Image (cartoon, grey):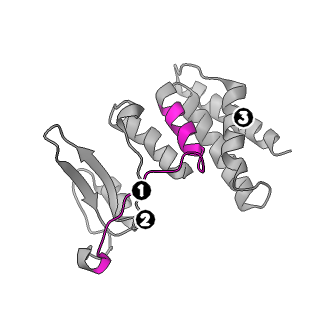
């Protein structure tokens, strides 16, 4: 669920939208990639097969569209689309991500850097899955949140957050 938290932060910045205006939903089929609610009550959704080649092709060709090599989506083959609210008590990283998106400043830099260290530690067997949000939160608490004035500050914050996350593992 950390990816959902990172996507929330990303969407908040990309669309200059307050985090409180962005909902996270769990969609087990991974067919709907985004939805936008309009004032008239309608919803516009982007649907596609769950394949990262599609957003990569989109990013590479923007504003044009190119073939990604992904098969056309066959909605009749999937039958249904389910949406569930996230369990924030089971996945505390979602709450952390929302708080970070709302805080802005250096918090997203810290969140991302600590997440990368914690996930790497999990994948290598140095940390348990449930330790990932604990490590991130600890680093966020230690560093606090500050404003960003230059790229060098971003890089320094990232470096410091990674060091502190690594220290949390020992």
Neighbour tally class for label 1: few under 14, some 14-19, many 20 plus, Cα within 10 Å:
few
**Do the numbered discs 3 and 1 sit on residues whose CB atoms are within 8 Å?**
no
Viewer-nearest of labels 2 and 3? Answer: 2
Name the residue that disc number 3 marks.
138
Pick the front one: 155 or 133: 133
Name the residue that disc number 2 marks.
28
- Quadrant containing the C terminus is top right
Q: CA distance from mark 2 to mark 3?
A: 30 Å
Name the residue that disc number 1 marks.
84
State the extent of the magenta-drawn residues as a range. 77-101
Tell me which label, 2 or 3, sits earlier in the chain.
2
- Outermost left residue: 40
Q: CA distance from mark 3 to mark 1?
A: 29 Å
Q: Is residue 92 magenta?
A: yes
**Do the numbered discs 2 and 1 sit on residues whose CB atoms are within 8 Å?**
yes
x and y percentages locating residue 158 in the rendered image? 64, 35
Q: Name which residue lies at 53% across and 50% down.
A: 87
């Amino acid at each position: 669920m950390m990816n959902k938290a990172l996507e929330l932060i990303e969407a908040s910045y990309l669309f200059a939208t307050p985090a409180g205006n962005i909902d996270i939903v769990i969609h087990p089929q991974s067919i709907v990639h985004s939805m936008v609610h309009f004032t008239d009550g309608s919803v516009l959704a982007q649907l596609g097969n769950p394949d990262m080649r599609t957003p990569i092709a989109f990013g590479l060709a923007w504003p044009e569209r190119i073939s990604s090599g992904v098969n056309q989506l066959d909605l009749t083959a999937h039958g249904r689309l389910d949406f569930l609210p996230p369990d924030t008590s089971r996945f505390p990283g979602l709450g952390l991500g929302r708080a970070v998106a709302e805080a802005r400043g250096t918090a997203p830099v810290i969140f991302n850097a600590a997440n990368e260290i914690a996930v790497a530690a999990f994948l290598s067997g140095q940390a348990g899955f449930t330790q990932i949000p604990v490590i991130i939160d600890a680093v966020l608490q230690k560093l606090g949140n500050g404003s960003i004035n230059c790229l060098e500050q971003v890089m320094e914050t990232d470096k410091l957050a990674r060091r502190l996350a690594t220290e949390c593992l020992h």
